[in-house]
Amino acid sequence: MNVIEVSELTYRYGQFVAVAGVDFTVRQGEIFALLGTNGAGKTTTLETIEGFRKPASGRVRAFGLDPAADRPALSARTGVMSQQTGLIGELTVAETLDLWAGLTTRKDSAKALLSTVELTHRADVQVDKLSGGERRRLDFALAIWGRPPLVILDEPTTGLDPESRQGLWDTVEHLKDIGTSVLLTTHYLEEAQALADRVAIMHNGRIQVSGTLSDVLSEQPARITAKVPYGMELPKLLGDVALDNEQLTVQTHDLQADLHELLQWADRNAVRLRDLNATQASLQEIFLSIGKA
Ligand SMILES: Nc1ncnc2c1ncn2[C@@H]1O[C@H](COP(=O)(O)OP(=O)(O)OP(=O)(O)O)[C@@H](O)[C@H]1O
C-alpha cells in the first residue's frame, strides 16, 4: 500500500521552478530517502506533502488525502521534523513536551520519549540553553510523539554527533519495525545507505535516479584496481580496462565475472596482483556524477 503518492509535482517560487515534475511513492512501512544537491527541491517537495505548500501542478496524496486541502486530518497521522526548529526558547524540555501533548491528539509518555532521545537529564533545562544537537533530538521527539503512521524528517541528523546520529537511526529502524512509513531527506549518504529501503536522488528540481539501493548502485559500474607487472598482456575482460604504468583499473557492470577472469589470469601467469581491490560503486559516486551532469 502506498502511503504517499507524488506524480508530476511542480512548484514555483514566483517564476523560479523549484520542483519540475517529480514522481515517487512511499510504501507503508518503508524508509524512503530523498537525496540531492543543495537547492535540488527536497524541502519544497516535503512541504507540499506536509500541506504547507500548494503544488503549481501535479498531484500529491498522503493516506489518499490532498495535503493542502486536508491538513488537519493529515497532521493527526503525520509527525514532521523540519529543518527549522519551531521550539519556544523560554520553555523547558519537559514543558515543551507537555505543551505538545495538549496540541496533538496522539498520546505518548514524555518520560519514555525523553529516554529514547537521551534527553532525560535535560528535562528541566530551557530550550534556548540546549545545544544544537539536543534541540534536534527534541524536535525528533516531537515528530515521533504518539508513533504516527507517517514520519517526515528533513535532514534529521544535521548537527548530531556520531553517537546521537546512531541513536536516531536505531529509533528510525524501530519505527519501521512497527510499521511506520518514514520519508527523510539527508546529505549523509551513509545515512541513506544505512537506513533506506529506497532512495531518490534529486537535482535541479527533478529526480535523476531512484529505486532500491541495490538498483541504484548497480546502474553504476563497479571498479577493480590492482598493480600488475609492467609489460604483461592482460586478459580480455567485459569492462573497460585502463592501464597507467603498473596501475590497472577496470570499470565493469559484471564484477564477479571480471574478477574471476583476472584472478585466473594471475594464477596462470604466476602474477601477484598487488593492492588488489574490488568495490561496487558507492552512492557517493552516483551522487557526484549526477551533481556534475
Ligand atoms: N521561499 C523561497 N523563495 C524563493 N526561492 C526559494 C524559497 N525556498 C526555496 N527556494 C529555492 O528553491 C530551490 C529549492 O529549495 P529547497 O529548499 O526545496 O531545496 P533543498 O533540496 O531542500 O536544498 P538543501 O539541501 O540546500 O536544503 C532553491 O533554489 C531555493 O533557493
Image (spheres, rainbow, N blue to C red):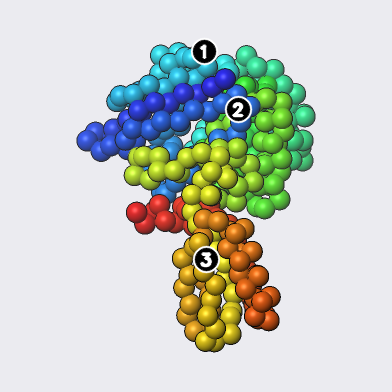
Residue at disc 3, secondary structure: loop
Q: Residue at x 38, y 21 (%)?
A: 59
Q: Quadrant of the C terminus?
A: bottom left
Q: Residues within 10 Å of mark 1 (few under 14, many from 20)?
A: few
Q: Residues within 10 Å of mark 3 (few under 14, many from 20)?
A: some
Residue lying at the far front of the rendered structure = 268
Percent across and percent down for residue 238 are 50, 61
Task: Give residue 246's quadrant in the image.
Answer: bottom right
On residue 73, which mark appears?
1
Between the residue at mark 1 and the residue at mark 2, the CA separation in whole angstroms equals: 17 Å
Q: Which residue is mark 3?
A: 237
Decide which of tag 1 and tag 3 comes sooner along the chain. 1
For the residue marked with disc 1, what is the amino acid? Ala
For the residue marked with disc 3, what is the amino acid? Leu
Q: Quadrant of the N terminus?
A: top right
Q: Residues within 10 Å of mark 2 (few under 14, many from 20)?
A: many
Task: Give residue 278's quadrant in the image.
Answer: bottom right
For the residue marked with disc 2, what is the amino acid? Ser
Q: Residue at x 68, y 81 (%)?
A: 270
Residue at disc 2, secondary structure: strand
Q: Which residue is mark 2?
A: 181
Percent across and percent down for residue 256 are 62, 58
Q: Residue at x 54, y 83 (%)?
A: 232
Percent across and percent down for residue 272 are 67, 80
Q: Residue at x 42, y 56 (%)?
A: 289
Residue at disc 1, secondary structure: helix
Front disc: 1 or 3: 3
Residue toward you, 26 or 12:
26
Decide which of tag 1 and tag 2 comes sooner along the chain. 1
Between the residue at mark 1 and the residue at mark 3, the CA separation in whole angstroms equals: 58 Å
On residue 94, which mark appears?
none
From this viewpoint, is residue 108 visible?
A: yes
